[in-house]
Amino acid sequence: MPELPEVETVRRHPKVTPALEVVGATVGDVTRRGKYLLARLDGDRELVVHLGMTGSLRVRPPEDQPDPYARAWWALDRAGGEVLEYRDVRRFGRLAVAEAGVYAGTLAVQGPDALDPALGPDDLWRALRASRRAVKTQLLSQRPLAGVGNIYADEALWRAGIYPARRTVTRRQAESLLAEVRAVLTESLAYRGTTLRDYRTVEGEPGDNQTRLDCYGRAGLPCRRCGSLLRRTVLDARSTTWCPACQRR
């Protein structure tokens, strides 16, 4: 599933200076909250886009054929006849028009964005202490902070040396975890996100960060920090990779 770096990469690259049309509305700008893209429309409304498991946005040149998995598309109001195309093979993504700032579902209850500078270590520590669930499960819930999914949770927890199933963290661990979450997200952004299967940039290109992953998907391979073999388990229905030496229980 596209996570914060992939969604932010999509947000950065459309460069919607000319407006695109959404049922006659005009787009002002495109922002992001966690894994959600928010396109500000006139009339104090927003187009809310969640890419789901296999969703992607692409600017399609007029000479290209429409994608057979395109679920929605908007004509760009500029010379050239380009189309902004929303593609979703498995149909897990969501599109909605909402009153600006009035949301439902996960978007309404999620925590602050993981890259929001106003979020501090004490904020994350208090949020994690409010639940007895595994720390990785809490990260995936989007409640303590928003934008982290399975890939970057494994990466950040490995970097911070925190066992994913741990149910309590110290303030120092929360500080380290927040720093590592931000580091892995920022680094992935520099490489245009992680493509394991479906994710593509607006130009239709894969990201490059998949070659730089230290933990996620590397079960059975040596830990790049200590040399121990990484292990894999299923934690609350999510595949989880960790190092038994670096991330002690």
Image: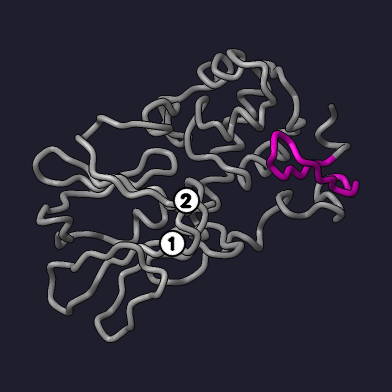
Quarter of the C terminus within the rendering: top right
Q: Is residue 146 left or right of residue 233?
A: left
The answer to whether 49 is drawn above or below residue 196 in the figure is: above
Tell me which residue sits at (21%, 35%) in the image.
Answer: 100
Query: In terms of sequence position, does the residue under pointer 2 or pointer 1 come before the other?
Result: 2
Q: CA distance from mark 2 to mark 1?
A: 8 Å
Q: Which residue is mark 1?
A: 88
**Kind of residue sitting beneath label 2:** Gly
- On the image, the x and y values in percent for residue 103 come to 30, 32
The answer to whether 160 is drawn above or below residue 50 in the figure is: above
Residues 75 and 220: in front is 75
Tell me which residue sits at (24%, 71%) in the image.
Answer: 83
- On the image, the x and y values in percent for residue 92 come to 47, 52
- On the image, the x and y values in percent for residue 88 come to 43, 61
Instruction: Answer few, some or many: residues within 10 Å of disc 2's Cα (few below 14, many 20 plus, some between 14 and 19).
Output: some
Residues 153 and 178: in front is 153
Tell me which residue sits at (16%, 49%) in the image.
Answer: 28
Tell me which residue sits at (61%, 37%) in the image.
Answer: 180
Picture quadrant where residue 181 is located: top right
Instruction: Answer few, some or many: residues within 10 Å of disc 1's Cα (few below 14, many 20 plus, some between 14 and 19).
Output: many
Element on which disc 1 rests: strand
**Kind of residue sitting beneath label 1:** Asp
Q: Residue furthest bottom?
A: 63
The answer to whether 32 is drawn above or below residue 13 in the figure is: above
Q: Which residue is mark 2?
A: 52
Is 240 within the magenta? yes
- On the image, the x and y values in percent for residue 208 come to 56, 64
Picture quadrant where residue 76 is located: bottom left
Looking at the picture, the colour scheme in use is: one colour
Is 97 within the magenta? no
> What residue span does the magenta drawing correspond to?
226-243
What's the mark number on residue 246?
none
